[in-house]
């Protein structure tokens, strides 16, 4: 509403205590190569996501079992071994068919969803020798399992994950 007082326009503003829905504005692709890389990564992420979800769920179960004071160390080790066999039977053939890029994405997304690096996860669940073995294998193939996930280093991956309905976990807000 406008009212004139001494030749000046005065505007009344109403403030609402409501939040607006987030809107993302994307710049158009700089070139076809950038668009191709984005679409390829999105395709790879959709292939890897079921494994990430299963591993994340399994890790939460293992952590709950480990933090349960009524569970003995032997019961915990038997539980981990049984879950490892279950996951191996369910996913081993499919995961062996992943290419290197998909494997790297799998490692990054596991680190993203759990807020732990894979080296720490293997050390916690299995043992340091197994973690060292897998870290050596990863280093030979150009990866590092002992690297923490940083969302600022992966803007394209973060954009893809939010598009797919996987916002950044709340544990990253405290960083």
Image (tube, rainbow, N blue to C red):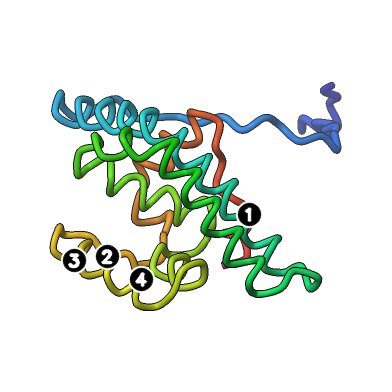
Q: Secondary structure at mark 1?
A: helix
Whole-angstrom CA distance, mark 1 to mark 4, is 19 Å
Dot in front, 4 or 3: 4
Q: Position of residue 101 (x, y in %)?
A: 22, 42
Q: Position of residue 142 (x, y in %)?
A: 16, 59
Residue 104 visible in rendering:
yes
Image height of 167 relative to 107, above or below: above
Whole-angstrom CA distance, mark 2 to mark 4, is 11 Å
* Residue for point 19% across, 44% down: 100
Find disc 2 in the rendering and name its residue: 144
Q: Secondary structure at mark 4?
A: helix
Whole-angstrom CA distance, mark 4 to mark 3, is 12 Å
* Residue for point 44% across, 74% down: 127
Q: Quadrant of residue 123?
A: bottom left
Whether the residues at callouts 4 and 3 have beta carbons within 8 Å, the answer is no
Of pointers 3 and 1, the one earlier in the residue sequence: 1
Tag shown at residue 60: 1
Tag shown at residue 131: 4
How crowded is the residue under tag 4: few (<14 C-alpha within 10 Å), some, or many (20+)? many
Dot in front, 2 or 1: 1
Of pointers 2 and 4, the one earlier in the residue sequence: 4
Whether the residues at callouts 3 and 2 have beta carbons within 8 Å, the answer is yes
Tag shown at residue 139: 3
Whole-angstrom CA distance, mark 3 to mark 1, is 27 Å
How crowded is the residue under tag 3: few (<14 C-alpha within 10 Å), some, or many (20+)? few
Of pointers 3 and 2, the one earlier in the residue sequence: 3
Whether the residues at callouts 2 and 1 have beta carbons within 8 Å, the answer is no
How crowded is the residue under tag 1: few (<14 C-alpha within 10 Å), some, or many (20+)? few
* Residue for point 24% across, 28% down: 40
Q: Secondary structure at mark 2?
A: loop
Q: Secondary structure at mark 3?
A: helix
């Amino acid at each position: 509403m406008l009212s004139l007082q001494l030749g000046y326009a005065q505007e009344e503003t109403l403030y609402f205590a409501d939040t607006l829905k987030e809107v993302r504005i994307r710049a158009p692709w700089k070139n076809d190569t950038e668009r191709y890389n984005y679409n390829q990564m999105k395709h790879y992420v959709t292939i890897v996501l079921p494994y990430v979800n299963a591993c994340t769920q399994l890790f939460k179960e293992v952590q709950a079992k480990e933090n349960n004071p009524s569970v003995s160390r032997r019961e915990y080790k038997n539980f981990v071994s049984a879950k490892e066999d279950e996951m191996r039977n369910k996913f081993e053939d499919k995961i062996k068919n992943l290419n290197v890029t998909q494997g790297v994405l799998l490692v990054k997304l596991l680190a993203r969803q759990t807020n732990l690096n894979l080296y720490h996860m293997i050390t916690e669940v299995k043992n340091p020798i197994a973690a060292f073995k897998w870290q050596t294998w990863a280093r030979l193939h150009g990866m590092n399992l002992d690297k923490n996930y940083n969302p600022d280093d992966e803007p394209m991956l973060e954009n893809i994950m939010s598009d797919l309905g996987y916002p950044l976990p709340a544990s990253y807000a405290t960083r």
